[in-house]
Amino acid sequence: MAIISSNIGDNDFSVRKKELRLVDSSIIQEEKRNNNLNLARPITLKEFIGQEELKSFLRIAIDASIYRKEPLEHTLLYGQPGLGKTTLALLIANEMNTKCKIATAPAIERPRDIVGLLLGLKEGEILFIDEIHRLNRLTEELLYSAMEDFRLDLTMGANRGARCRTINLPRFTLIGATTKLASISAPLRDRFGLSHKIKFYTYDELKLIIVNFARLINLKIDHEASYKLAKISRGTPRIALRLLRRVRDYAQVIKKTNLVSADLIQKALNSYQIDEKGLDSFDRQYLSFLNQNSIVPTGLDSIASGLGDDPSMLEFVVEPYLIQIGFLTRTPRGRLLTALGKKYIDSRNDNF
Ligand code: ADP
């Protein structure tokens, strides 16, 4: 049973909404109808490109829940940033014809935050918690009975004045997203009925995402150009879309056109210092730093302080792609450049 701090009043379950992003999936549909360019997010499983295995699992799970008139089982999605975890949560809500509330774990600081969030849910609604591995222990403990028995066990007050109170919750679905599966405690992990990895996307899948988004933003992109962009998008839709937006800026401002060719992409990428592998100046700075110590593994913290950046940014944003293309290995003693990575960085004669 989780203990809530003594200053919580019986009716004081208000959530600090300004710190939590609460999104209603119907907003997504509305914005799409209005052709809001922000929303490249697919809203049905059919529209969602790639992740075929995951989609067929979800299709069955969603249809089974709808058939039984039950909420979807609690679902854990894990994978690198930008692969579509939030998109999937909103899409699931849309497919289940329900609402999805979004919160990020670091914003759920006090037990009353999660209590407020849970009490704000209605039957069948979805609560999406991003970066769920960062929940604090008390919040996590409150979630155990909420997830398993749709019940909150609270202790209010302190010492001799303490009272226990159980509150029944509507049946809801928790969708958790994480980039760090191993950091989720076993009891929390075990309470998710469904757990899926989101993989990197193939070039063909990214090309399709790029072509669809280009259509949405009135850009004409040819086959060669969309494939070129796909190849440097690190297997990640968010990066593909970001690069496409930069290419659009370049095309419209410098070339005064909405037509994107492979040649134009090359020029745009050169101007942003992104090379043919999709590496930018910061990636090259990272590789160059390691190259100076290429014989011995270097610890993440040393690299982070050497580059003046945050270790978790390096770990989750920079390194996964460098590992994927075979430029970097992680050893128990630190990071090591591979022969391929060394050859690449030695061959660069620019200053990042
Ligand atoms: P995550 O939550 O994993 O960090 P998001 O769901 O926010 O990633 O996705 C990042 C961006 O990529 C969003 O703009 C989303 O629309 C787009 N996106 C992700 N996956 C797909 C996909 N399969 N098809 C089309 N767009 C996608």
Image (cartoon, rainbow, N blue to C red):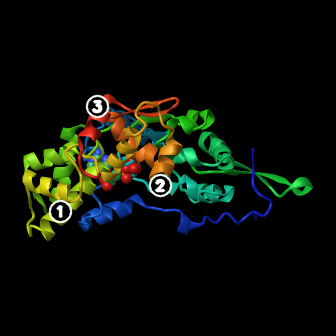
Q: Is mark 2 within 8 Å of ligand 1?
A: no
- Distance Cα–Cα, label 1 vs label 3: 32 Å
Is 35 displayed left or right of 25 in the figure?
left
Dot 1 or dot 3: first in sequence order is 1
Q: Secondary structure at mark 3?
A: helix
**Residue 110 higher or lower than 232, as above or below:** below
At label 2, which amino acid type do we have?
A: Gly
Q: Which residue is mark 1?
A: 248
Dot 1 or dot 2: first in sequence order is 1
Q: Secondary structure at mark 1?
A: helix
- The residue carrying pointer 2 sits among few (fewer than 14), some (14 to 19) or many (20 or more) residues within 10 Å by Cα, namely few
Q: Can residue 77 be spotted in the picture?
A: yes
Q: Picture quarter containing residue 184? A: top right
Q: Nearer the viewer, residue 60 or 87?
A: 87
Q: Secondary structure at mark 2?
A: loop
Q: Position of residue 110 (x, y in %)?
A: 67, 57
